[in-house]
Structure formats: structure tokens, C-alpha cells
Amino acid sequence: MGCLACYNEGRLVGDWVDAVDADEVDQATVHKHPELAAYRNNASHDELWCFDHDCLPMSGEIAPHDAVAWGERYEELEDSQWEPYLRWCTDVLHETTTPPDAEEFRIAWRGEWADFSDFAWQQFQELGVTDGMTEEQARYFNFEQWASDYEMDFHVHPAAHSGHVWIYNAYA
């Protein structure tokens, strides 16, 4: 969190805070150092912004209330879900301003898989796709074609750091 006026005057003034706490920082806190005392109650130095942030889907400065919204969303998710959630926001929903609902993500999120074929095979077995077919019909069933068609119902994106894929339901 930093003072926008100080930033525009060439001084980077502020403190690192968790995103969820961004709205708790005030003008006096940002200007707490003795050499900045003159700015603590100066009306032209009352606008605070987040100038630097990590692990959020946008670049550049953001307003404190936006940082809080993303911080609250982070706290709703498990640590292992944050990167897939960000990918879902940016590459599936194309939303980087307002954090989408965590429950919607949980509904869409189908997990991390070695590849889509592994996911499709698990779904094939779970859904019992060939149940009720005769032995001859099942023998001629083309799993690869079924999996290719089935993939149209999902968004498949490379997972960060693992070489696997993250899969999201396209219709959730």
C-alpha cells in the first residue's frame, strides 16, 4: 500500500500488507516515518493504492478495495486451488477486475490430470459409457473419438510447473 501523491512525486512510500488487509491501511500509517510527518494529514496525500502485488491476475496498480476482494477470495480457497483459480479467471472467464465466486470455480474445476485422455478414461469408467452395450458393440466402441468429442465440454489448460493439465467444465 502506498501514497499515490508521493508516488507521482517520485517517492515510493508505503508498506507491504496482505491483500485482505489493504483497506485497514490509512494515510497516517503509510506516512509513519518521521521524514513524512508533514503528509500524515495532508488532503493531497490521502489517496492510497496498491502499487506492487504478487499472485493476482492483473498487472499495474489496483485500488485497496479491489485488493481486499481478491484477498478474501484467496482465503476462501485452498492453497493448491489458487493457481488453477487464477487460470480459470484469466483464460476461461477472461475476468481480472472482480474476483469470480469461489463456489462457481469449485463447480467448474475438475482437477489436475496428466492429460485429458487420463481424465476422459476416468470419466468413461465412472459414467459407464458402454454399459448396456452388447459385447460386440463395446468392442467396436472408439474411445479415442469419444474422448475427443467429450473434450469439447471442457477447457483444458497447461498446469503451472507440472507438465500436467488443469481441466474446467465449460458449462458450469
Image (cartoon, helix red, strand yellow):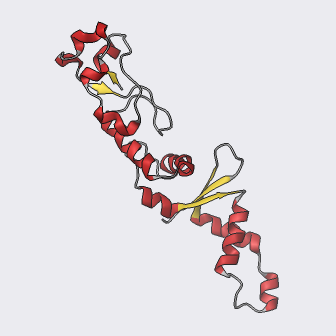
- Return the residue found at the far top: 35
Compared with 41, 84 (above or below) is: below
* Image position, residue 165 (x, y; %): 66, 53
In which quarter of the view is residue 114 placed?
A: bottom right
Give the camera-side residue of 89 and 6.
6
Residue 111 horizontal side relative to residue 54, left or right = right
The residue positioned 57% from the left and 50% from the top of the image is 80
Residue 43 image point, x, y percent? 17, 18
> What is the quadrant of residue 117 in the picture?
bottom right
Please report the residue visible at 64 percent of the width from the left and 44 percent of the height from the top: 160
Q: State the image coordinates of residue 13 (x, y, percent, origin top left).
A: 36, 16
Position of 65 relative to 51 (above/below):
below
Residue 24 position within the rendered picture, expressed as x and y whole percent measured from the top left: 29, 34
- Residue visible at 31% across and 14% down in the picture: 6
- Tell whether 74 sits left or right of 150: left
> Which residue occupies 48% across, 65% down?
172
Foreground pick, 101 / 97:
101
Is residue 119 toward the left or the right of residue 134 in the image?
Answer: left
The answer to whether 87 appears left or right of 127 in the picture is left
Quadrant containing the N terminus is top left
